[in-house]
């Protein structure tokens, strides 16, 4: 059996994954590409215009 991931490490991994997802979504919005999301039990495709911009301090 594998050892459990320490809480601090799992929090860092979670934050990294969330940041990567946010960057990918923002890239799709800027390039005019649609994305598909899971919403209310269904797959919904959003056009680039429907993707809200990410507020970033970068």
Image (tube, rainbow, N blue to C red):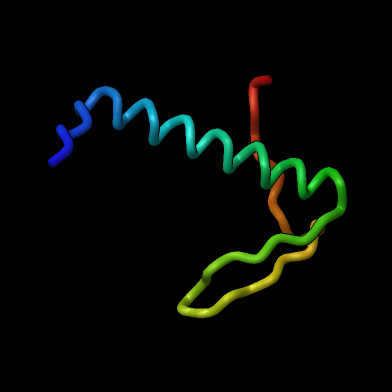
Q: Please, which residue is most extreme toward the front here?
A: 1
Q: Is residue 55 above or below residue 9?
A: below
Q: Is residue 9 above or below residue 37?
A: above
Quarter of the image holding residue 12? top left
Q: Position of residue 13 (x, y in %)?
A: 39, 31
Which image quarter holds the N terminus?
Answer: top left
Q: Is residue 15 left or right of residue 31?
A: left
Q: Position of residue 52 (x, y in %)?
A: 69, 51
Which image quarter holds the C terminus?
Answer: top right
Q: Is residue 24 left or right of residue 11?
A: right
Q: Please, which residue is most extreme toward the bottom here?
A: 42
Q: Residue at x 58, y 43 (%)?
A: 21
Q: Residue at x 64, y 21 (%)?
A: 57
Q: Residue at x 58, y 36 (%)?
A: 20
Q: Is residue 42 above or below residue 33?
A: below
Q: Residue at x 71, y 55 (%)?
A: 51
Q: Please, which residue is most extreme toward the right here?
A: 32
Q: Is residue 47 left or right of residue 25?
A: right
Q: Position of residue 41 (x, y in %)?
A: 46, 79
- The number of callouts visible is 0
């Amino acid at each position: 059996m594998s050892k459990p991931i320490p809480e601090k490490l799992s929090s860092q991994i979670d934050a990294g994954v969330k940041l990567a997802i946010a960057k990918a979504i923002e890239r799709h919005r800027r390039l005019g590409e649609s994305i598909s999301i899971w919403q209310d039990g269904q797959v919904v495709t959003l056009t680039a215009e429907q993707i809200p911009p990410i507020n970033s301090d970068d």
